[in-house]
Image (spheres, helix red, strand yellow):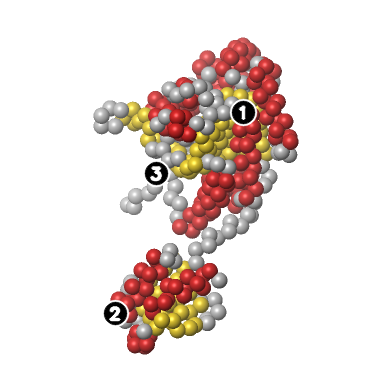
Amino acid sequence: MAIKAVRGMNDILPPEVKNWRYLEETSRRLLQAYGYSEIRTPIVEDTSLFIRSIGRATDIISKEMYSFSDSKGRNLSLRPEETAPVIRAYVEHSLNKKFGFSKFYYIGPMFRSERPQAGRSRQFHQIGTEAIGSYSPHLDCETIILLVDIFSALKLTGYLIRLNSVGCKACRIKFKKILRNTLSRHINLLCRDCQRKLTTNVFRILDCKKQGCQMVIRRMPVILDYLCRECKGHFEKVKQILDGAEISYQTDPYLVRGLDYYTKTVFEFVHPSLGSQNALAAGGRYDSLVNELGGPSLGACGMSIGMERVLMTLVSLNKKIPALKEESVYLVTIGEKAYREGYKILRDLRKQNIRTHIDYEGKSLKSQLRRAGSLDCRYVVILGENELKKEVAILKEMKTGRQVEVEIDRIAEEIKRYFRS
């Protein structure tokens, strides 16, 4: 019996990869324009990193982590998110001393042991940013505006920006006590999971998506009424900056995100076409995390884009994803001598970064031309006995059928000139 991929971990086949590359390259261009530098961290980290940063009582830690012990008994985990690894790398390599204020972006796979469904796989992919070293509300807004610009470049429309503040540690201590007391009066209406969270992490109840719990949650006090003066001023400034930039958003006082490290500003970009798992992107500020992971006290803000969900949304909107410009050449050889000589041409073309194909099985001229057509090659180079005698090759443009003879040692130069025109 054939072995299949692990459930919830999907192959991305060549016809789909072009869409992924379009998303990656469009995002990468804007991330670099905004001053972000790429960082790549290991897929496997010490489990304690996520327990310390995300919070032991979160669903990610208690239910969704892929954790295991290696041969030396070390407790390791596949990364469920990338903020904690980036901050770990930032602290470990003392990047604050090397760069001061720093802006990083990443593109890669994350892992959570959730029930697979549309828009939610066990291996999923994110594009994200982490900006470290500023407490300014302008950084919060720039992060949101960056997402707006990425989605605009992708021609992705119809999303809603949800915005809230979860305050600082002092705000949350006071609010959690009030929330716990109020929710306790309605405990029988909460799901079993939320009943447990009432004592372990009451703030996480606000993130429950079950309808019965949502009906209770929407009658609860909101944290915006319990923010300290500094947090309230920060949130007002964020809204003023977004208003000035003409960014539309909806204040949602029940938005908390599923990670414990967030402080002050949190946000989500949601799309109605995605159903219950409707977040395209999300993020916020985390002003305590660098210090909690052993670094200095520094403000920070970040976001992440769910790549699968963005691609699903583009398809649902019938957005045509542009094909990447990868013009190619097919080298047709007739006979063993032509093949040997042609392989020199092949290497010359590839040294010029020209995508080039060749037949390895001695197929007929007709079959090779048919293969060139199926690969959507722009040009074909034909080399046979007659061409070898004249020390030329035939350069044929597939679309028009126009063909010319070109000296063999000038083929690569000539094709590169044609591609530029």
Q: Position of residue 130 (x, y in %)?
A: 52, 35
Q: Position of residue 272 (x, y in %)?
A: 65, 41
Number of numbered labels in the structure image = 3
Residue 137 place in picture, x, y as percent:
64, 29
Image position, residue 11 (x, y; %): 43, 50
Which element type, helix, strand or loop, lies under badge 2? helix
| Mark toward the viewer: 3 or 1 | 1
Amino acid type indicated by mark 3:
Val
- Residues at circles 3 and 2 in contact by the CB criterion of under 8 Å: no
Q: Label 2 belongs to which residue?
A: 336
Label whose residue precedes the other's in the sequence (3 or 2) = 3
Looking at the rendered image, the disc whose residue lies closer to the viewer, 3 or 2, is: 2
Other residues around mark 3 within 10 Å, as few (<14) / some (14–19) / many (≥20): few
Q: Which residue is mark 1?
A: 136
- Residue at horizontal 29%, vertical 79%? 336
Residue under the point 70% across and 35% down? 242
**Going 59% across and 19% down the picture, which residue do you hit?**
168
Question: For the residue carrying disc 2, how many other residues have a C-alpha within 10 Å: few (<14), some (14-19), or many (20+)?
Answer: few
Residue at (72, 30) in percent of width and height:
240
Q: How far separated are the C-alphas under marks 3 and 1?
A: 44 Å
Q: Secondary structure at mark 1?
A: loop
Check disc 1 and give the amino acid type.
Answer: Ser
Q: Amino acid at mark 2?
A: Glu
Front position in the image: 160 or 102: 102
Q: Is residue 226 left or right of residue 332?
A: right
- How far apart marks 2 and 1 lie (CA) works out to 68 Å
* Crowd tier of the residue under label 1, counting other residues whose Cα lies within 10 Å: few below 14, some 14–19, many 20 or above: some
Where does the C terminus fall, quadrant-wise?
Answer: bottom right
Seen in the picture, residue 60 relative to 42 is either above or below; the reply is above
Q: Which residue is mark 3?
A: 6
Tell us which disc is closer to us: 2 or 1.
Answer: 1
Could one spot residue 177 in this view of the protein? yes
